[in-house]
């Protein structure tokens, strides 16, 4: 094994927008002996997870669980909802909106993409105008919180704008927003919402969750893209027997049940409020360091801060990880080296955010003269 500099494990801290730190009781579940997945014991965990996910998604729709990261859940939406030659529209506010477009192109489609200036949320009026100018799409793909820029989209208004101009399915990536940022799947009429285990849901990486409305099922039942592992119909068929079609990441399901128990005990709205408070705190800490907020429409689950010209953001992130054991995220694609992103979702607490900002201050200090 390659020798890498290691900080003591108990001082390590993840302030990245996924994976995020786990509550100790969730980590303990991941270390329990593995159950067999075709047993009543596992079935009880599986069913509980799906029921609690419906609480977090705020939906009565079917929720499917797949062993994949969030991108796998996103790809399953493209594979199950569309057919060769279909029109699809993407509203992109950053890297993760662009990911929808890349997935759709991977399936041979040519999505119409409405790209919003990075750092801003999509404006519902702009979206309505964009949709009027293209042939009616079969589905419109949206992002809840774009983790690359730290924005949150107003999904309620965007969904209304979509419905006003077409009967397209509304498909949302809430991989980073779920269980951190307000979301009303049924209340806002979202047909498909994709989430993942490793962010606000406080579990290890490896599970993707997808809620599917009746309208979306009607489309999925006759869609013609080839699919096998990610076929939602196969997943739905095995739900009555409380199992997945193939071997799931059993220990993650058991751990997710515990994390969801904690979320239900706190109450989802309280989780949203706590995350929003922590976001306000993180923004104020950024201000104290003289770092402007990158997002004009900031989300609550992470804070993206613009670094001063001339400061090497990639080196800063590396130094903080190697010297302090704290992982914060740098910028992606066009923002590489230009921003730092500090997450404050899930199990992350005020004292963790404090440690992140103290490390930032310490290692930016010489460059910034503070
Ligand atoms: N969408 C968003 C908004 C994300 O933040 C992420 C992960 N950073 C993904 C999709 C992709 O998820 P994964 O890395 O689990 O495939």
Image: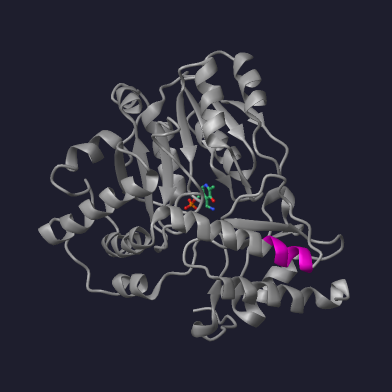
190 up-or-down from 49: above or below: above
244 with respect to 300 (left or right): left
Q: Residue at x 64, y 78 (%)?
A: 322
Q: Where residue 120 appears, x then y in whole percent?
A: 70, 41
* Residue positioned 86% across, 73% down in the render: 367
Residue 344: percent from the left, percent from the top? 56, 62
From this view, report whether residue 235 is shown above or below residue 369.
Answer: above
Can residue 175 be seen from the camera position used here? Answer: yes
Name the residue furthest bottom: 8
> Is residue 287 inside the magenta stretch?
yes
Between 162 and 9, the one lying in front of the other is 162
Report how many numbered discs are placed on residues in the image. 0
In what quadrant of the picture does the C terminus appear? bottom right
Is 173 left, or right, of 32 in this rendering? right
Task: State the image quarter where residue 288 is shown.
Answer: bottom right
Q: Residue furthest left?
A: 40
Task: Confirm whether the magenta stretch covers residue 266.
Answer: no
Q: Nearer the viewer, residue 43 or 223?
A: 43
**Residue 199 appears anywhere in the view:** no
Above or below for 189 versus 205: above
**Image coordinates for residue 91, horizontal then vertical, percent:** 60, 31
Give the image location of residue 262, x and y in percent.
35, 64
The colour style of the image is one colour
Q: Nearer the viewer, residue 81 or 298?
A: 298
Residue 201 placement: quadrant: bottom left
Magenta segment, prevailing SS (helix, strand or loop): helix
Q: From this view, report whether residue 186 is shown above or below residue 344.
A: above
For residue 342, what is the image quadrant? bottom right
Bounds of the magenta span?
283-288
């Amino acid at each position: 094994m390659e020798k890498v500099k290691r900080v003591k494990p108990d001082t390590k801290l993840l302030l990245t927008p996924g994976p995020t730190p786990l509550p100790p009781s969730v980590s303990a579940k991941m270390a329990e002996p593995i159950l067999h997945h075709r047993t009543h014991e596992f079935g009880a965990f599986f069913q509980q997870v799906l029921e609690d996910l419906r609480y977090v998604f705020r939906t009565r729709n079917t929720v499917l669980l797949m062993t994949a990261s969030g991108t796998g859940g996103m790809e399953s939406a493209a594979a199950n909802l569309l057919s060769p030659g279909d029109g699809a529209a993407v509203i992109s506010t950053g890297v993760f909106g662009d990911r929808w477009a890349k997935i759709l192109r991977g399936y041979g489609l040519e999505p119409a993409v409405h790209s919003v200036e990075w750092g801003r949320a999509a404006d519902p009026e702009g979206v309505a105008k964009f949709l009027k100018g293209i042939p009616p799409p079969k589905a419109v793909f949206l992002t809840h919180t774009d983790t690359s820029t730290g924005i949150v989209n107003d999904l309620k208004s965007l969904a209304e704008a979509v419905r006003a101009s077409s009967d397209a399915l509304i498909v949302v990536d809430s991989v980073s927003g779920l269980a951190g940022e307000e979301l009303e799947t049924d209340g806002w009429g979202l047909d498909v919402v994709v989430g993942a285990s490793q962010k606000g849901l406080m579990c290890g990486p490896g599970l993707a969750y997808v809620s599917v409305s009746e309208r979306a099922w009607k489309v999925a039942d006759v869609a013609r893209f080839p699919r096998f592992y990610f076929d939602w119909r196969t997943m739905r068929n095995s739900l009555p027997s409380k199992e997945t079609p193939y071997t799931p990441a059993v220990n993650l399901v058991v751990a997710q049940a515990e994390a969801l128990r904690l979320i239900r005990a706190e109450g989802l709205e309280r989780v949203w409020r706590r995350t929003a408070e922590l976001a306000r705190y993180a923004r104020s800490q950024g201000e104290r360091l003289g770092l402007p907020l990158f997002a004009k429409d900031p989300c609550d689950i992470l804070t993206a801060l613009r670094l001063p010209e001339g400061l090497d953001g990639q080196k800063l992130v590396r130094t903080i990880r190697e010297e302090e054991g704290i992982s914060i995220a740098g910028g992606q694609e066009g923002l590489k080296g230009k921003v730092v992103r500090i997450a404050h979702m899930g199990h992350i607490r005020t004292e963790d955010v404090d440690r992140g900002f103290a490390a930032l201050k310490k290692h930016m200090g010489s460059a910034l003269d503070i």
